[in-house]
Image (cartoon, rainbow, N blue to C red):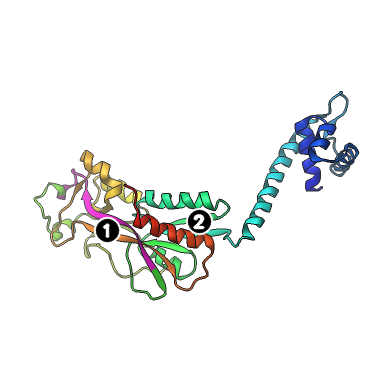
Amino acid sequence: MTLDQLKILEQIAETGSIGAAAKTLYRTQPTLSVAMKKLEEELNLSIFSRDQYRITLTPAGHSLYYKAKQVLKKAEEFEQLGQYLTTGCEAELHIAFFGELPIAPLMSVLKRCEQDYPQTKLHLSVENLLGGMERLLENEVDLAILPWKQENHSLEYKPFVKIRLMPVVSPQFPPALLSPPVPQEVIKQYVQVVLKDSSRRPSKETYGVLEGGRQWRVNDLHTKKAIILSGMGWGNLPEHIIRAELDQGLLVPLQLENYTAFVESNAFVVRRFGQPTGPVAQKLWEDFQCYAANPPD
């Protein structure tokens, strides 16, 4: 069985005759007839019914025709990928980003990448705390978007977007009924919902966690938000994902004694210094910077 035989099968099925298929393929009718006869002999079944004036597909032929189209499509994609790779473009890229990141800016950059480099497969992973840094340092991703900048001379940082975190609670949460600021010794009696570090070697730094207090640890932002909305705990959430709940009064800011009420910081796009960079990774790097310099209104 060859791709050429599958192409002939496809054309005969779609044009309705060997003659029309021969014209489409710029081949002779006997050549096509011989090719189909050999295919039938190889498969030991009849693909075409020749009892009528027009050649038609048998039930088995219909099944083979649909499968042939799929195989030919994959073969075309394979050929296109080969041609694409000869240009030096990467077949795939891996990008890690932290869960609190505003998703619209990321999608804006990735959409342009999809338009310019549709053959490059992107692998996206959501990481918490030091997880993205670890994936980058261990060469598991090509680019990472991190919530802060750490001194590391092996990494190159560029600012991307700003994020704003705030401690919030449900209005029914008991500490929300107290006069602000709520003493830390009081709030420690209640559950603080904390994102679990996704790195394999978590840091001992706590990043806003009240030591000595009760804690529930979750590995994704949506679960954290759901727990806080339900009135079972409190925690820091990015303003952009709770704006609607704040406006509707479903969540309220929590003012705590000796605790920063609002944290504003830059998210950074990061890559390793000296890593071989293909054209797609380089264009993504530049597009992230372009977005940061000219964010949409």
Q: Which residue is the site of mark 1?
A: 215
Crowd band around label 1 with a 10 angstrom C-alpha radius: few (<14), some (14–19), many (20+): some
Q: Which residue is the site of mark 2?
A: 123
Distance Cα–Cα, label 1 vs label 2: 32 Å
Residue type highlighted by circle 1: Gln
As drawn, is 36 to the left or to the right of 248?
right
* Residue 286 in picture, x, y percent from top left: 43, 60
The mark found on residue 71 in the picture is: none
Which of the pair 183/250 is nearer the observer?
A: 250
Residue found at the very far bottom of the displayed protein = 153
Does the segment drawn in magenta span residue 4? no
Residue displayed at 13% across by 59% down: 257
Residue displayed at 40% across by 65% down: 270
* Label 1 vs 2, first from the N-terminus: 2
Residue type highlighted by circle 2: His
Say how many tags the image has. 2
Crowd band around label 2 with a 10 angstrom C-alpha radius: few (<14), some (14–19), many (20+): few
Q: Is residue 127 visible?
A: no
Q: Quadrant of residue 260?
A: bottom left
Give SS at disc 1: strand
Instruction: Give the answer, above or below, for where 272 lies relative to 33.
Output: below
Q: Is residue 223 visible?
A: yes
* Residue 170 in picture, x, y percent from top left: 21, 45
